[in-house]
Amino acid sequence: MIVRRIVLAFSLSALATIAIASTANIGERQQIMKSNGGATKPVVAMLKGEAPFDLAVVQKSLANYQDNIGKFVTLFPDDSKSGEKTSASPKIWEDMAGFKAAADKFAADAKMASTTIIDETSFKANMPNVLKNCGSCHEAWRVKDPQ
């Protein structure tokens, strides 16, 4: 009887740990996306002519993308497919290599832009290419109506 209670307690503890880890991964993914959105907002305003060009802000946004994307792709273990209103598409787990390739392309484009953007002209020529990654990734790897 005591052994059964110990086994049951251990099992429940293990399940709770897994559920917490899953929720933590989803929460971290959402925070990274909010961070990227915050970094994108001023850049888009500059592209639209709604804000003056500011190289320091652009470089900060590009650094944010590069810092975030490496961690972001590690936050999709099998136990984080659902919950916490995740908008992650099941396609991520079906084609993890493709998902990681998309993330690598985004990181590479952001890195390239960080070295080639030196003024407003180079910004307008290069930044849209970086931002296309956001749209294509959301289109391919995100569901529109989260659970």
Image: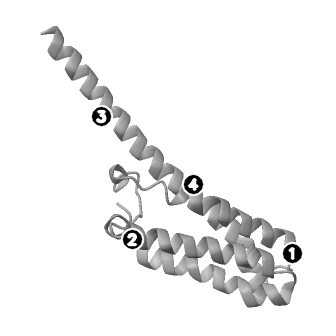
Q: Label 4 sits on what residue type?
A: Gln
- Nearer to me, 105 or 91: 105
Instruction: Give the mark nearest the N terminus, 1 or 2.
Output: 1
Q: Which residue is mark 4?
A: 31
Between the residue at mark 4 and the residue at mark 2, the CA separation in whole angstroms equals 17 Å
Between the residue at mark 1 and the residue at mark 2, the CA separation in whole angstroms equals 33 Å
Which residue shows up at 35% across the image and 70% down it? 95
Between the residue at mark 3 and the residue at mark 1, the CA separation in whole angstroms equals 49 Å
In the displayed image of the protein, which residue is found farthest to the left?
Answer: 1
Q: Residues within 10 Å of mark 2 (few under 14, many from 20)?
A: some
Q: Residues within 10 Å of mark 1 (few under 14, many from 20)?
A: some
Disc 4 and disc 1 in contact, CB within 8 angstroms: no
- Nearer to me, 22 or 108: 108
As helix, strand or loop, the secondary structure at mark 3 comes to helix
Q: Label 2 sits on what residue type?
A: Val
Which residue shows up at 75% across the image and 90% down it? 125
Q: Which residue is mark 2?
A: 143
Residue 142 in percent (x, y) is at 42, 70
Between the residue at mark 4 and the residue at mark 3, the CA separation in whole angstroms equals 24 Å
Instruction: Give the mark nearest the N terminus, 4 or 3.
Output: 3
Q: Label 1 sits on what residue type?
A: Asp
Instruction: Give the mark nearest the N terminus, 3 or 1.
Output: 3
Q: Which residue is mark 1?
A: 54
Instruction: Give the mark nearest the N terminus, 4 or 2.
Output: 4
